[in-house]
Image: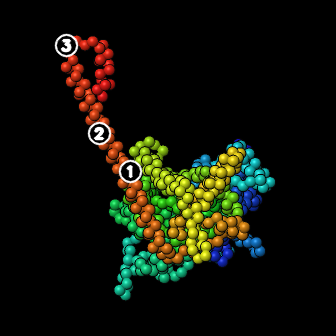
Amino acid sequence: DDEIQLLFELVSATDLPIGDKKTSDPYVVAYLGSEEIHRTQHISRSVSPIWTVDNGSLFVLHCTVQEFFAAADGISFYIKDYDKLGTNVTLAKLNIAQPTLLEMAKSDGIERFEMELDEMKHAIKASSKYFPSKLNLRVRNATPFDVSFLRQLHSIQKAKKLGIYADQAFIAPNTERVKLLKRESKVEDGVTLHRVKPFPDPSRDEYDTKWLSKEGIMKEAMAPSTNWVEAGSGKLGKLYLEVLHCDGLDNKDSTRKSDPFACIIYEDAIVNTDVVNDELSPRFMPWTQRAFCFNIQHPSSQVMIGIVDFDAENGMDDHDPIGRSTIDITNFRPSTEYLLTFDLYKSVLDDERPKAGTVTVRLRLEYDSYREFLKGSLAPPPVNYINLSKKHDFKTSYFVCNGEEVLGTYDKDAINSYRTELEGYADIAYYITQAIMTVVLWRGHREITVFGKKISLPLHSVVAFVMGVLLIDNFNYLPSFSLFSIAWLLLATNELRQRDPSPWHGSMTYMEMWNAVIRDKAPPIEIADHENEAAIRKYEAAVAERLEKEKLKAEQAQENAEKLEAFLHEEENAANAELETMETEMKGKTTFNPLAGVLLPSRTF
């Protein structure tokens, strides 16, 4: 052919040099020779940016064969730091020769190529002392559909009708420095020091953070992160998540300890921390890849985190899953820093699952407009599809989402999980019964203070009584009351949640929500250490006692059912034996009842 058409996808870059004081605002400019052929949008405050379709990750190189091979340096990619006031300095560059490009295009865009960048002297300093800057991209021959799609996409974006994103983001764990260290600890001045993993702080003198005591390592792990990675394509707000440390992990290696790393999945992004080799209680240092800033698509999306033993050094083996957990951020307050510890399990089943360790994270939720945040919750969460080119990455991501069971098949584990889920719904019957009794018996539930005395008002009973009287008088109120009942139910549910003395389980009251909507900003919350601990323990003990009684009641009902079934079975056997005896006695005798053989069994039983 006389023409060249190549489709490029600029996926991400990692460990870029710092162009500003502490970070960079990188964007990519692509050249064919000296001619600019593409420019992405800049990603704010990130040295490991991710580009999507929405900010210019895709472009098509369309030129003649002569123009293609006439370019002296092939295709050149310049990564620059965006600056509103100053000069956009070049951070790094990459030249790919024409034969290499054509060879890369044979992968049909399936393989993602990690290309090491040449860092420029214009940058202030390197963001990582141990990891070189890299540009991750895909290349394949462009089809007519690709060309048509990009033209349509550019016209839509130019008209600002809607935003489109790729739903593809994957940041792999850093493994360049994962080695079996010969010496793990030493003693100096009577103090046992341990080697800091995976590497010391590159911004300080190496010997300051190369060997530390256990207390020193824990202190460093709890310090604020200095290396943040941005991921996701939402626009409602930002979720800041730091993986701090794990404790008591299961050992998955036979010859030494596990090499754990954390895999986090949130909406359309999959990210991984650095690998900490040969540790069952790893501490993730603030200068490593452990901190992630997710752009939020939907307020109800959950964070899924899994701890995995790194075993895919040769690209052939699979990582060994250790444990997983899910973080529900629905009731988290904005501008509030949460320090949370979660138990890890390999199974998603609620019964008979051993704990595989714990993981501690630090989390903060931020958004600009509370009204937009509430508006976003009215729509269902989007379905995201993330393509992974490596089998072990897919298996790891599947484990983080679903656990070790394959619940799509009808095996014993799947049936047990469905049974456990149905048994969990039985607890709802208690609350429904209590709600009915509260309304019918006019039980007080809303406390007010009158002349220094607390009085409980049966507001639900009053509302139900007024609705009943009005309906009897005019049945046309039924549609209005049906819609009102939805709001009534939501108010009652919120009231029930507020009875829990634990500040972790409560939610915003409706008055707080109204104030937040009016001010367009939700208030933060402060939770003191051991706040309401005595009341919480008393409340949890009462719930546990009630559940135990219900369990014993259910077991007694099951035992009575089995006894009844055994009794009926014995009665049936006795009746059958008596019938056989009577039939034996009647043999050879004359009877005047021709229906005796038919009616006798019924009468006997």
Q: Give 123 or 382, whichever is nearer the viewer.
A: 382
Mark linked to residue 6:
none
Question: In terms of secondary structure, where does tag 3 sit?
Answer: loop
- The residues bearing labels 3 and 1 have C-alpha atoms spaced at a distance of 53 Å
Disc 2 crowd rating (10 Å Cα; few below 14, some 14-19, many 20+) is: few
Q: Looking at the image, which is closer to me, 208 or 374?
A: 374
Dot 1: few (<14), some (14–19), or many (≥20) neighbours within 10 Å?
few
Residue 125 occupies which quadrant of the picture?
Answer: bottom right
Compared across the picture, whether 159 is left or right of 233 comes to right
Q: Answer with mark 3 or mark 1, whichever residue precedes in sequence.
A: 1
- Quarter the N terminus occupies: top right
Say which of 349 and 239 sits in front: 349
Q: Residue at x 60, y 70 (%)?
A: 448
Q: Which of labels 3 and 2 is toward the front?
A: 3
Q: Earlier in the sequence, mark 3 or mark 2?
A: 2
One can see residue 567 in this view: yes
Name the residue carrying label 2: 566
Residue 503 to residue 547: above or below:
below
Residue flagged by tag 1: what amino acid is it?
Ala
Residue drawn at x 25%, y 13% is: 591
In 3D space, how far apart are the residues under numbered discs 3 and 2 (Cα atoms)?
A: 36 Å
Q: Which residue is mark 1?
A: 554
Q: Position of residue 206 (x, y in %)?
A: 50, 80
The C terminus - image quarter:
top left
Task: Give the percent coordinates (x, y) of residue 230.
Answer: 62, 65
The label number, if any, that marks residue 588 in the structure image: 3
Q: For numbered disc 1, what is the local secondary structure?
A: helix
